[in-house]
Amino acid sequence: MSGAKPMKDPLDLLDLPSTLTDEEREIQATVAKFLSDRVRPHIGEWFENAHFAREIAPELGKLGVLGMHLEGYGCSGTNAVSYGLACLELEAADSGFRSFVSVQGSLSMFSIWKWGSEEQKQEWLPRLAAGEAIGCFGLTEPDFGSNPSGMRTRAVRDGADWILNGSKMWITNGGIADVATVWAQTEDGIRGFLVPRGTPGFTTQDIKQKMSLRASITSELYFDNVRLPDSARLPLAQGLRGPLSCLNEARFGILFGAVGAARDCIQAAIEYADSRVQFDKPISAFQLTQKKLADMSVSVGNAALLAVHLGRLKDQHRIRPEQISVGKLNNVREAIAIARECRTILGANGISLEYSPLRHANNLESVLTYEGTSEMHTLVVGQAITGQAAFR
Amino acid sequence: MNIVVLVKQVPDSGAERTLSRADHTLDREDADLVLDEINERAAEEALSLKDTADAHVTVVSMGPESALEAVRKVLAMGADRGIHVCDDRLRGADVLTTAKVLAAAVRRVADVDLVLAGDATTDGQASAVPAVVADLLALPQVTHVRKLDVGAGRVRAERRTENGEATLDAPLPALVSVTEKINEPRYPSFKGIMAAKKKPVDTVDLDDLFPDADDAGFLVTRTRVVEAVARPARSAGTRITDDGSAGRQVAAYLIAHKLL
Amino acid sequence: MPDVLVLVDHDGHHVNKSTYELLAAARRLGDPAALVVGTPGTAARLGESLARHGATGVLAAESAEAAEFLLTPAVDALELAVRETAASAVLVSATTDGREVAARLAARLDAGLLIDAVDLDASGVVTQIVFGGSYTVRSQVTHGIPVITVRPGSFEPAEHPGTAVERTLTLPAVDPAASARVTDRRAAPAGDRPGLTEAAVVVSGGRGVAGAEGFEVVEELADAMGGAVGASRAAVDAGYYPHQFQVGQTGASVSPRLYVALGISGAIQHLAGMQTSKTIVAVNKDPEAPILDLADYAVVGDLFAVAPQLTREVAARRAVG
C-alpha cells in the first residue's frame, strides 16, 4: 500500500477531533497557532539556556488561557475539556509552558477563586488572568512531598496578625511570582495564606542545574518571621482538602498535557522516519519502525480518549479524584515511554535539541513525579478498587 | 462608523492544489480550509479601528457552507455580525460574478463608511476583486495599502506596488484593500470564540441578494476553460555539488545556452 | 482588420517595454490601437515609438486630472474607447495596476476577463499558467469581448515600422467622491537596474542570504548580468530586502529568460511567482531544497562562494565581449 498519504497526526487515527464541539476545536486551534508562532521557534533555545519567557505570560492572558476554566474576575469561563485541550497544545510545545499555565490557573488562581475572600479575588484574579501578575503555590517541602500533612511550615497568631516560618521546595514560578499561595500548619489545622512578593522575611532561590522543565522556573521559598495580616489568610480553606482540591485541578490539565507531549514526539518521529533513508528506503518502511509507530499511536489514542472522557465527566461535575489518578498515572507513564521510544527512531539525531522527543522525555520526568507521584496515584487507584489504603 | 470586511476561506497555503476534472475549478475538497491570511489582516485593520473609535464591523464571506467558519473566526476576533453568501450556483464563480455578489452583500449593510478587503488571496490570482467591488459600488478604490489612516471623513493611505509607492486620499465611504504587510492580526480570545456563537450571521443566497434578477443576468459564464493540463513537474536538470569551481561551471552552462 | 485596444503603460515620457510586448501580442488578433491616458501632450510624445512597434492607431485620452486619480481615468478611457471604436479585444499588462484596470473594465462591459495570459492565438484562446505553475490552462471568452491581461515577459517586442493614425477621446470628468486622489508618488528605488517584471534576468535571494548585508552578493551578480534583484518572502519577512522586490504569490510574478535563485528553498509561494522563467539556476546549501529539483542547473553549495565566483566570470566575459 505504498503511495498513500501518511497521517501526520496520530490522533487522527481515531478521529478524535470529531468528538469535540466547534468551540473546543477553535480554542485548541487558537492555542496551537499561538504556540507555533510565538513559542515553538524558540523553545529549543529557551530550554538550552534555562530561560523562562516571561513576556509570553501577558500574551497568554490576552488569549484567555490563564485561569480559563474559572468564571468571572476576567477569566474566560470555558468548559473543562477546552482547558484540557489548551494544556494538550501547551505541553506539545513544552511541558514548561504547560507547567506555568497549570500553576498560574489551577493552583494559584484556583486557590484564590475557590477559597479566597471577595477582596482577595478582586485584588488578584484579574491581574493573574491577564498575565500581568504571576502566581505560585507552596505546598511541597524539602522533607515532605507525598506526605504534605507532615509539613513543617507554620503560621502562629500574633495579636491580629500571623507569623509565618518555614520553607517550600520545587515551586514552579516561585522566583518570579507576585503572589504565593502558601500552605502552613496552624493551631486549627492546615491553612492557606496569600504572601505577596516583597513581604519582609519572604525570599526565594531559583533551583539551577535542572535537567528537566528548563524553560520554566522552579524555586525554593523561604519564610523567616513573615508577618501577615489576617486578611492574607484564605478564609474558606481549612485542612488538607484546601490544597488537594487545587492539585486535582492541576492534575486534570496534566493528563491532557501528557497526550500533547506524546503526540509531538510521535509527529517528530514520523516525519523523521519518512525522510531518513537507510538501506535505500525510508526507515518508516521498515517493520520494526512501523511497530514502534503503530504501538505508540494506539497508546496515544487511548490516552487521548481517556482524557476527553474524564473531561466530559468533569464538565458534568461528577469526576472523582481516583479517576483523575487513573488519567494522570496512565497518560504520563505512556507519554514518557513514547518520548523515549521516539528518540530511538531518531537515532543519534534524537539527542539533539533540534528534535523534541528527548526534551519531552526529560520534561516528563518531572511530570511523572509532581502533582502526585505515579506511585501515589497507583495507590489511590489501588485503594479505590480494593477498599484498602496502602499508603503507609 | 460602519465597516464591512470581505473575507474568503482558502486551502491552507502550502497544500497542493488540484483542479477538479469535471469543470476545471479549484478542487477544495482535500485541503484544510482556513481564513485567508491577508483577509485576516483586513479584519485586524477593521477591528483596530473599532478599538479606538465607535465602529460596527460586519464580516461578509461568499463560499460554501464551510465558509461560515471563516465568518465565525472574524466574529471571534471581535466583529459584530456576519453575512454568509452561500449558494451552489456560485461554485467556480469568476472575478466579475464574485465582485457583483460581494457588492450586493455590502449593499445590505446600511450606511457603510468603509469596506475592507485583502489585496490578494493566497489561493488564486483574483487580486482585482476589491477594485471591481469599488467600481460597482461607486466607491473610491484605495487598494494595495500598507498603511492606513481613517479620520475626519477621509482615508489617507500608502499604496505599494511593483511600480513604487503612492499616497492616496479619498473621502468616505471608500473601499480599501490591504497588503500582507499592514499589520499583525490578533488571535481570537477564548471569550471572543465563545461570544461568536451568539453573534448574528445572516445566511443569504442569490435570490435574497438579487430578488428581481433572473439567474441568466449575472450567472452567465463569461469565459470557458478549453483545456487544463497538469504541467509536468519541471524536470530536474543538471545538479552539481560545489567543489570550489561551481561558479565557473554555472558560467560555462550559461554561455553554452547563450544566456550570457 | 478589427481594432485591438492596447492600454499603454508609460511614465509620461517613455513607453514601458511591457507595452511593446502587448502590441506584439495584439497583432495576432487584429490591428493594434494604442490608448494613451495621460496629461495633455503625452500621446504626441509617445506616438512615434508606439507606431514603430506596430500600433496602427494611437488614441489620446488626455486631461489635466488624468494623472491625479488612481486608475479611474484609465478605466473610463478604455470603456469609452471600446464603445467608440467597437474594439474586438482589449489587452492590458498584468501588472498590479493593469489587473485592476482590466477587471473594472470587464465589469463595466460585462465582458469576459482572461487573467495573466502567457500566450494567445488568433482565435482569442489564451494560455495561462495557474496554481504555482502546476497547470497550463487554455481559455476563451464566451460572453462579450475578451479583456486580457498579459504577463510581462511573455511576448517578444518587435518593430513594425509604420505610421499610426492619431485620434482624440474626450475623457469624462472624474467624480472625486468615487475615486482616490494620488497626492504623492515615489518610484521604487531601483537605481540603474531594470524593473523586476521587465528584466530578462532576475537574481533573487532568500533566507540563505542570512542578512541585509548578504544581499550585496545578490546585487553584484544581478548588476554583472544587467538583471533585476528579487527576494523571497522569507527574506523580505526577515527584513533583508524591501517588499517591492518580493517575487512570489503575494509579490511580483516574473518570467525572465534567466532566473537565478540564491539561498531560496523553493516554497510553493515563491515558485508561483517564478516557475514560468525560461531557465532557472539555483544555488542552495541544503541538498533537500525543493528548488534544486526544478532548476535547470542546480548547485549544492554555499551561495557566498558560488555567486561571487560567477560574478567574476560574468564580469570577465563582459569585459572581453
Image: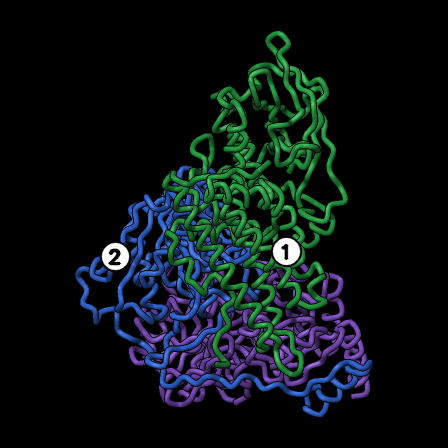
Q: Does the image show residue A358?
A: yes
How far apart marks 1 and 2 lie (CA) works out to 42 Å
Chain identifier matching the blue colour in the rendered picture: B
Q: Which chain is green?
A: A
Q: Is residue C141 above or below residue B43?
A: below
Residue named by callout 1 = A41
Image quarter of residue A156: top right
Residue in the foreground of this view, choosing between B258 and A154: A154
> Residue at the spot x=41%, y=52% of the render?
B73
Numbered disc 1: what chain? A
Q: Is residue C43 visible?
A: no
Q: Label 2: chain?
A: B
To which residue does mark 2 refer? B204
Taking the view exactly as shown, the residue that stands out farthest to the top is: A159
- Give the residue at x 45% y 87%: C27
Residue drawn at x 64%, y 71% as measured from the top left: C265
Residue type of the residue flagged with mark 2? Val
Do labels 1 and 2 touch, CB within 8 Å? no
Q: Residue at x 64, y 46 (%)?
A: A366
Drawn colour of chain C?
purple
Q: Nearer the viewer, residue C211 or B33?
A: B33
Give the SS element for disc 1.
loop
Q: Position of residue B25 (x, y in %)?
A: 37, 75
**Badge 2: few (under 14), some or many (20 or more) residues near its Cα, within 10 Å?**
some
Q: Position of residue B39 (x, y in %)?
A: 45, 57
Tag 2 secondary structure: strand
Q: Residues within 10 Å of mark 1 (few under 14, many from 20)?
A: few
